[in-house]
Image: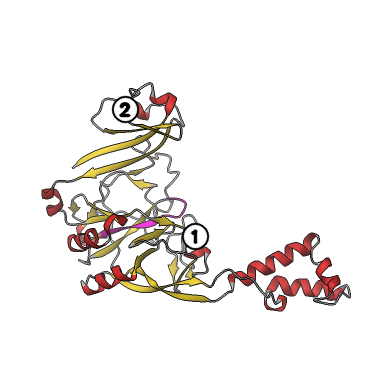
Amino acid sequence: MREVFEFRIEAEAARLLFRPDEGRIEAGARVVAIAASDPRFARVGALAPGALRGWTVRRTFTDAERAAAEIFHLEIRRRFGPSGGACGTAYDAARACPLCGAGRRQIGTLVLRHVPDAPIAQTFAGEIVVSAALAERLVAGRFTGFEMKPVARRAPDYRGPLRLESVPSGRRLLDRARALGIAPHSYEFMLWSQIGERCDLARAAWEEASRERPTIEDSRFRQIVPTSRPVEVHASTRFGVSPFDLDEEGRHRCDRGHALGLRALSPIAIERDSHDGSDLVATRRFAGWPEPTPLILLSPRLADALRTTAGKGCTTVPGADVHPAHSTGASV
């Protein structure tokens, strides 16, 4: 495996380490790619706070390394929002962790405002959506560990007519008008409802009517929902904020052990005994913040299929070794 890190460094700070002809300038930052073995790598981490604006890592593997891998980490490039929770998707949060939200369970159809026109995409809350064409190929391939569910979208933005009696804020507005002797829907009511707190109630009534507009199943997309037994991430997998910040203070980890960190800094390793053999599995513990989500891992067969059918929509990164069982100690 070969790792190359791409750093975005504030242009003035970059002059301390890199020649003017190295990398490229984007939005006031110099973008440079170096290997961890480069003597300047550690010096990048020692730059003044704020000088390092961002980073990514590209890992390349030999054909032999890919052939030997038992698991692959699915990294979906197209991320989007708003997520299902902001669009009316129903969830059961009775067992959710109050600190990080882990354990929240989707109980209704995934409702989204829009979905990118891509073979595979993922909301910021971790919901995975694939095109109908890709869904058909995955079903035909008889892959295991997940099911396909419908995706719905809200009807176009609500433009009226607004029936105040049909929403809570509208009913409160009508009650206040009647208490003052103002006839609902009269010209006097129209003027009165546009002032101060009444205007806020009228605006809230429109928002409530918009949220309650019907959903329409979108036949162009399907949601992938893992059904396999969650796997345990092995303790050898490193998590943190960056190669220079392992988050020793735990800013992006849940005190109850559900969230492992902001992002994985190394290839994912799992415990062999926790894998039920499915083609797609999700990890029991999560990564990311403030909405941590499980990592998605694939069998070699499914990884090959996605590389062929999903194009540039995702990457499948070989995992590290699959280890014997090792207790991690967190539960949801």
Q: Residues within 10 Å of mark 1 (few under 14, many from 20)?
A: some
Q: Is residue 143 visible?
A: yes
**Image location of residue 29, percent across then percent down:** 42, 32
Query: Residue 40: which quarter of the image?
Result: top left
Name the residue nearer the viewer: 77 or 158.
Answer: 158
Between marks 2 and 1 in the image, the one whose residue lies nearer the viewer: 2
Range of the magenta residues? 289-297
**Image location of residue 192, percent across then percent down:** 83, 66
Who comes first in sequence, dot 2 or dot 1? Answer: 2
Indicate the quadrant containing the C terminus: top left, top right, bottom left or bottom right. bottom left
Outermost residue toward the right in this view: 181
Q: What residue is disc 2 on?
A: 22
Badge 2 element: loop
Residue 293 magenta-highlighted: yes
User: Which amino acid does the dot numbered 2 rest on?
Assistant: Glu
Looking at the image, residue 69 sits to the left or right of residue 159; the answer is left
Residue 282 marker: none
Q: Residues within 10 Å of mark 2 (few under 14, many from 20)?
A: some
**Image location of residue 205, percent across then percent down:** 69, 69
Q: Is residue 312 above or below residue 185?
A: above
Looking at the image, residue 323 sits to the left or right of residue 230; the answer is left
Q: Is residue 90 visible?
A: no
Q: Residue at x 35, y 58 (%)?
A: 294
Q: Residue at x 59, y 70 (%)?
A: 211
Q: What residue is disc 1 on?
A: 82
**Image location of residue 5, percent across then percent down:** 30, 37
Badge 1 element: loop
Q: Are marks 2 and 1 in contact (CB under 8 Å)?
A: no
Q: How far apart are labels 2 and 1 at the CA level? A: 38 Å
